[in-house]
Image (tube, grey):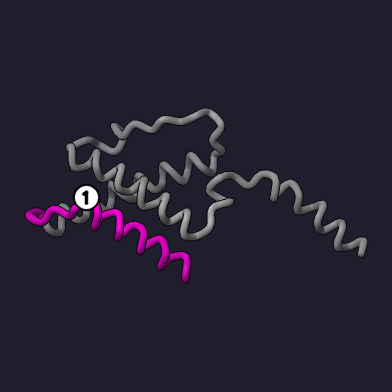
Amino acid sequence: MLRILVALILLLPALSSADRVDRMSAAERCVYTAQLAVAGYHYFLQGKARNEVPIHWHGDETQNEIDFVTRTLDQAFAAAERDRREQPSARVSEQVFGDRAYQACMDADRT
C-alpha cells in the first residue's frame, strides 16, 4: 500500500504539468493538427514564407505547446512545398490538405 502511495505521489508533478496538448485525446490532437496545417497552408498559398505566419500567443503556453504549434506549421509548409515540387500544376485544396494532415496524424497514433 505504501509503495502505491509513493508511486502516486511521484506521479503528481508529471500529471499537474500536463498541458492542453497532452490532455487532448488522439482525435482532438489530430483535429488541432489539421487546423494548424490548413492555417499554414492558407499562408503558403498566399506566397508567404513560413516565418511570416502570424501566431498569436496568449502568454500562458507551455514550451510543449509552443513546440507543437511550431513543429506542426513547419511540417505543413514542408508538405506544401513537396506537393508543389512534385506536382507543380496541381493545386491541392485546403480541404484535401487538412484531410491528409488529419489522416497522417491518426495513422501515426495507431502505430
Q: Which residues are magenta?
A: 88-111
Q: Amino acid at mark 1?
A: Glu
Residue 74 falls within the magenta-colored stretch: no
Task: Count up the numbered dots.
Answer: 1
Mark 1 element type: helix
Label 1 sits on residue: 81
Residue lying furthest bottom in this view?
111
Residue at 49 percent of width and 29 percent of height: 58
Residue at 69 percent of width and 50 percent of height: 15
Residue 4 position in % (x across, y down)? 85, 62
Badge 1: residue crowd in 10 Å (few <14, some 14–19, many ≥20): some
Left or right of 58 in this view: 53: left
Residue at 73 percent of width and 46 percent of height: 13
Residue 98 falls within the magenta-colored stretch: yes
Residue 54 position in % (x across, y down)? 34, 31
Residue lying furthest left in this view?
89
Residue at 36 percent of width and 63 percent of height: 104
